[in-house]
Amino acid sequence: MKHINHLSTKSYFIDRTGKLSASFMFYQMQDIAWEHANILGFGYDKLRKEQQFWVLSRLLVKINRRPDWGENFILETWSRGTDGFYGYRDFNFVDGAGKIIAQATSSWLVLDAATKRIVRLSEFTDFPKYEESVFGENAGKVKAPQADSELLFTPVLFNEIDINQHFNTGRYIERIIDSYDFDFHASHELAEYEINFLKEGLPADKLAVKKQMVDGLNHLCCVVREIDGAELVRARLVWRRI
């Protein structure tokens, strides 16, 4: 069963182009996923009682266009079931004419809060499944970027920490997008990104973005922690010229 939200692009959701920002598109997907999980009986409050919590592991997003300021649109999501470890969830952004303007597929894990070990979703009874798949495949494994340039590490900020006391997943996307300068954004827009969330960022961390330009439009990125050099996320970005 699909779950649907009717949304509009608020002024505080847009970037300097007047369109819904890529990071707020992510936040809307995150929010509807949590909302639907609660409806299905597998939400934050339910898992918290069992000392468990959801974490996003992989995400693949393809963007035809982003909604304009004030534009009404629909965001729909559904669970595609589980393979025992991952829970799969897809998304459609649909405009007022019924045209799909962006799609995504995501892979989630449930962790034990004390041990940080993965909880098998096969232990959950009646885990929901809806057969439709937006891409016919799941988000994949992203390669590590190869780059020798000096990294600029900056502290984690208060608003970058989520309710689980970890670096907010959406903030990784913001850090990566913000690592590109204004001139690049003036001539490019994000058409696709695939991201793997690998390790937890914490309040005391200092982070930097490493980038490899595979070619002019295809880039590999990661967010690196200074203290141990760990890659917290890896991302594959596809840009288009505007």
Image (cartoon, grey):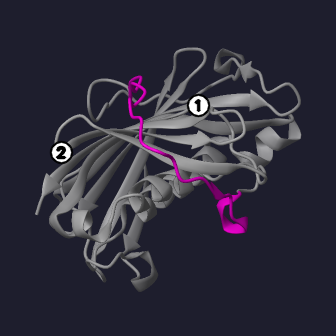
> Is label 2 in a helix, a strand or a loop?
loop
Look at the image and tell me in which quarter the N terminus lies. Answer: top left
Which percent across, then down, holds residue 126? Answer: 63, 25
Range of the magenta residues? Answer: 139-161
**Residue drawn 22% across the image and 59% down it:** 189
Residue sitting nearer the eye, 69 or 185: 185
Q: Position of residue 185 (x, y in %)?
A: 25, 65
Counting residues from the start of the chain, the first of labels 2 and 1 encountered is: 1
Q: Is residue 2 visible from the viewing direction of this image?
A: no
Residue 217 got which mark?
Answer: 2
Specify the quadrant of the image occupied by residue 11.
bottom left
Q: Is residue 132 left or right of residue 29?
A: left
Drawn side of residue 43 relative to residue 195, left or right: right
Pointer 1: residues within 10 angstroms few (<14), some, or many (20+)? some
Q: Amino acid at mark 1?
A: Leu
Residue plotted at (31% across, 23% down):
137
Q: Is residue 140 above or below residue 187?
A: above
User: Which of the numbered marks, if any, corresponds to residue 85?
Assistant: none
How many residues crowd mark 2 within 10 Å: few (<14), some (14–19), many (20+)? Answer: some
Residue plotted at (60% across, 53% down): 153
- The kind of residue tagged 2 is Leu
In x, y percent, where is residue 193? Answer: 33, 43
Residue under pointer 1: 198
Choose top left, top right, bottom left or bottom right for residue 37: top right
Q: Is residue 141 magenta?
A: yes
